[in-house]
Every structure is written in structure tokens, then in C-alpha cells.
Amino acid sequence: AQSVTQPDIHITVSEGASLELRCNYSYGATPYLFWYVQSPGQGLQLLLKYFSGDTLVQGIKGFEAEFKRSQSSFNLRKPSVHWSDAAEYFCAVGSNDYKLSFGAGTTVTVRA
Amino acid sequence: DAEITQSPRHKITETGRQVTLACHQTWNHNNMFWYRQDLGHGLRLIHYSYGVQDTNKGEVSDGYSVSRSNTEDLPLTLESAASSQTSVYFCASSEAVNYGYTFGSGTRLTVV
């Protein structure tokens, strides 16, 4: 069965600083990997996804993520955060049976 | 535009009552999913369906049931609500695993 670990429960970052959120997955085959963002009181919005090809993927809102098979990681990055990036971020791994398994999430706080 | 809607947005019910949460999608997706979101646990899969008349149990299915009589709807029923079922519930649909999920806005359920 697949699983996801997000080691950081909460990250605080200054506006304009860079952000990196860690994600490690466990899956026996080539994974389908996703990052979602959830603003307070909202549903989840897809930021980006990876399932093949270039291991550096670009997403919406200026986010990118890099798939590293050797480290079983799919870390999310943004070069310069904005106050509107304050939210909860979820990494997820999918399998051929269409099910996604989610990490526990990382809450990002942006300070002025 | 296609969408996925959940109702109600908020619900308070008493212990022991039967409760049904609605999920309706107009994406024409065959695959539909119910998750619950709890602090520290991320999203956990309750039930899912690959098409009409198909339903399957997820990792936290005890006390819940679903039915799929058409492509658009996957209602989630709590047979006898318990305080442990106080949570935020998300419905999602998907065309294929490599596309990820489209999520509804969630239902916040409180069992008193």
C-alpha cells in the first residue's frame, strides 16, 4: 500500500523568502504524485502533479516540485512567497486503482 | 462550467441519528471518493466508487455507507452518528489517476 510522510507540521516563513515543503512517499511502482493547497474553510486545489517525464514540474501560483526517485521524495518549492500563500499543503501519492493517499499536511504561516 | 458540489456546508446532528451528506458532480467522472479530514491525519479514504452500482470500502469505512445509482451522485450516509465522526468531509471525483482529483468544498459535520 502507498503512503506519504510530510515531516513538517508547521512552517513559518517571511514574505519574500523562499519556501520548501518536504514530502516522502512509499510506493512499489512508479508513483503518481500530487501537491494540493487548502486555504482556510476551502476545498483542496491541485497545485501540480507528476507521473512521468521531466522530474522538475511547474505548477500554478509559481510553485514547482522535483521528483527524486532515489530519495522517494517530491518536495515543493517556491522562490518568493506571498502573504496569500499562507495555507495548508498536502502531498499525495496515487496508484493505478485511482486512489490517492494523502500526507498529514504542512501548515504554512507567512509573516510580514 | 462543470463542478462538484457538496451539501450541506455545515451540519449539527445528535448522537445516534442517521445523517446523509450529498455529493453531486457534473464532470461526468466515473470515479468518486469520500474522505474525512481530521487534524494530524490529513485526509483518510472512507468509501469510493468506480461507476454506477459500484461501491468499495476505504481505510475508515466503519459506520459509513454509500450508494451509486447514477454517475453524478455519491451520497455518504452515517448509519448512527457518533461523536468520533465529527469531522470535515470531502467528496472528490476523477477521470483518471494521472489527472488527480477535483474536490468539493467540504461539509463540516458536528455530532453532539
Image (spheres, coloured by chain):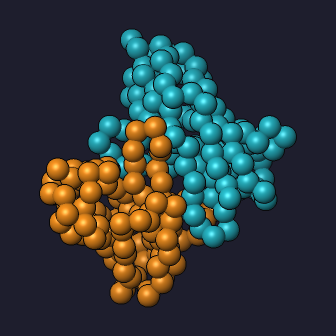
Q: In the figure, the orange chain has which letter?
A: B
Using residue B8 as the reference point, say whether residue B65 is left or right of it. Answer: right
Give the x, y percent position of residue B32.
Answer: 45, 71
Residue A66 horizontal side relative to residue A8, left or right: right
Determine which quarter of the picture holds residue A66: top right
Q: Nearer the viewer, residue B85 or B94?
A: B85
Using the rendered image of the protein, determine whether residue A53 is visible from the camera's viewpoint: yes
Q: Position of residue A98 (x, y in %)?
A: 59, 67
Q: Residue A12: x, y in percent?
A: 48, 18
Q: In the rendered view, tell whether residue B61 sits above or below residue A80.
A: below
Residue located at (39% from left, 54% from top): B36
Q: Residue at x 63, y 58 (%)?
A: A94
Pick whichever, B74 or B97, lies toward us.
B74
Q: Quadrant of the N terminus of chain A?
A: bottom right
Q: Position of residue B57 (x, y in %)?
A: 49, 71
Q: Hey, which quadrant is residue A76 in on the image?
A: top right
Q: Is residue B93 left or right of residue B14?
A: right
**At x 73% / y 54%, what residue is drawn?**
A27
| Residue B26 visible | no
Q: How many marks?
A: 0
Horizontal side of B93 relative to B4 (left or right) equals right
Q: Is residue A90 above or below residue B95?
A: above
Quarter the C terminus of chain A occupies: top left
Of residues A86 and B35, the one nearer the viewer is: B35
Q: Colour of chain A?
A: cyan
The residue that appears at 50% across and 38% down in the rendered structure is A105
Residue B36 drawn above or below residue B63: above
